[in-house]
Amino acid sequence: MSTQVNVAAVIIGVTTVILTGGIWLMTRNSGEVKGTTVGEVELVSRSGLHWHPKLEIYIKGEKVELEDGIGLGVVEKPMHTHTEDYREGVVHMEFSGRVTAEQTRLGNFFDIWGKKFSSSQLFDRVNGDEGVVRMKVNGIENTEYENYEMKDTDRIEIRFE
């Protein structure tokens, strides 16, 4: 009987080591993994993210406030606004699971909001309206516009002048 107990103890011990090692290998690369690609998809995180970039919009010098509850409703979108800070331009990015760079694009927030935004258009204004769209991210001119991949604490300023 003691031989059977010893064999069972060895099997349990080996199984525990294998399972622990497997779990460690699977989780050691979790979290933010910017730059990692899976096929053609660039991953930002494997375990979700909770970021808060700020967005300021000006049309002909007038500030346009974000709206309360953008992306909130029966189904909560991963990019949305909240009552307590939408006036400050805070965009809540609350993704779970795997997050790709494409999902963090500024244009996705405008799509959720139901507004148009690109290098040539802001809301219903287009370059033909005798104006131009300009964008700065963290004080630096940026020409990625709707393709810009937002990051935590970004300060994004869009102007149509």
Image (cartoon, helix red, strand yellow):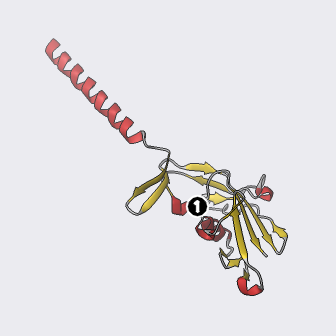
Q: Which residue is mark 1?
A: 149
Above or below for 26 versus 81: above
Residue 5, percent from left and from top: 20, 16
Describe the element under mark 1 as helix, strand or loop: loop
Classify the position of the N terminus by image quarter.
top left
Give me the residue at 70% from left, 67% from top: 135
Name the residue at the right extreme. Answer: 62
Residue 33, percent from left and from top: 48, 49
Dot 1 crowding, Cα within 10 Å, few <14, some 14–19, many 20+: some
Residue 28, percent from left and from top: 42, 39
Of 132 and 105, which appears nearest the observer? 132
Using the rendered image of the protein, determine whether residue 2 is visible from the camera's viewpoint: yes
Using the rendered image of the protein, determine whether residue 1 is visible from the camera's viewpoint: no
Give me the residue at 16% from left, 12% from top: 2
Of 158 and 92, which appears nearest the observer? 158
Of 154 and 81, which appears nearest the observer? 154
Name the residue at the front extreme. Answer: 140
Report whether 43 appears left or right of 107: left
Report whether 5 appears left or right of 122: left
How many numbered discs?
A: 1
